[in-house]
Image (spheres, rainbow, N blue to C red):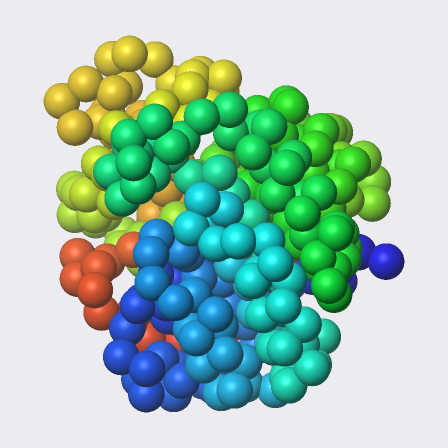
Amino acid sequence: MSFDLTGTGIWSGQLRYGDVAQVAEAAAELEEMGWSALWVPDVGGDVFAALRNLLSATSTVAVATGILNIWMHGADETAAEHARLTADHGDRLLLGLGVSHRPLIDRVNEPGTYRQPLARMLEFLDELDAADPPLAADRRALAALGPKMLELARERTAGTHPYLVTPLHTQRAREALGPDGLVAPEQGVVLDTDPATARATGRQHLSRYMELPNYVNNWRRFGIEDEDLADGGSDRLVDTLVAWGDESAIAARVQEHRDAGADHVCVQVLTDQPAELPRQEWRALAPALT
């Protein structure tokens, strides 16, 4: 049986890299507010310690990686850590796996490390199956954007956790995975009704991703053109990828993903202070989204 994940979750880099005590306190509050999952990224450092902190601070909420970087962790380590965390904290840990991006991996490793990402993901899944204990297919998902990775997600995992995508991508993911595969997209949101400042926050967030071909190529599949990528990104680019406005406007975008076939949507709250836990925004959005 696939990992049972519904409702609306929180995707947060601050929960991964913030002060451990503050993160634990925030996680407990997020669980109390009714968010169904806490998702954290992995761009270096001890991701398993961060997962343990979140699991220790909570009792029912699901915890997930979005994503665990397969170039930075061995399959045996990954399977063993999942087994330990599950034994200690119950069956509420989903490992989203991803191939990351050439510029990052070749910068932190030897140049040329990043190659044949689809083949490497297939190899990593084989290694997870062969680990002792193995990491079950229904306790892992893929950050799948393109058709081939979506196919692999359907065949070898619980489903997909795509990042920086549109409801149209969610529809395509649902079609690719069929009725039973998990579809759990991330959605960036800005709780701000002023178009200028909301878009400025969204544009600041997108700037780092506009240099990554995996994302840009995927956006092109859904109508983003060269002019949208010029001069820091067009309003159309921001509006396509980031939901902004009041609580009802953000809830409407989340509902678009649900209508397109998402089982679960995790929102990443964006502010002009990206290093700080956006606890006020989480509290404001909870009644509309949980």
Percent position of residue 212, x then y: 32, 29
Q: Which is nearer the eye, 123 or 184?
A: 123
Say which residue appears at 36% left-offset and 42% top-offset.
242
Say which residue appears at 49% left-offset and 87% top-offset.
57
User: In which quarter of the view is residue 24 placed?
Assistant: bottom left
Is 49 on the left-hand or right-hand side of 266? left
Percent position of residue 254, x then y: 54, 49
Farthest residue toward the left?
Answer: 231
Q: Quadrant of the N terminus?
A: bottom right
Farthest residue toward the right?
Answer: 1
Say which residue appears at 39% left-offset and 62% top-offset.
12
User: In which quarter of the view is residue 228 placed?
Assistant: top left
Is 199 on the left-hand or right-hand side of 91? left
User: In which quarter of the view is residue 76 placed?
Assistant: bottom right
Q: Which is nearer the eye, 52 or 11?
A: 52
Percent position of residue 3, x then y: 74, 60
Q: Which is nearer the eye, 111 or 269?
A: 111
Is residue 182 something one can see in this rendering? no
State whether residue 17 is above or below residue 111.
Answer: below
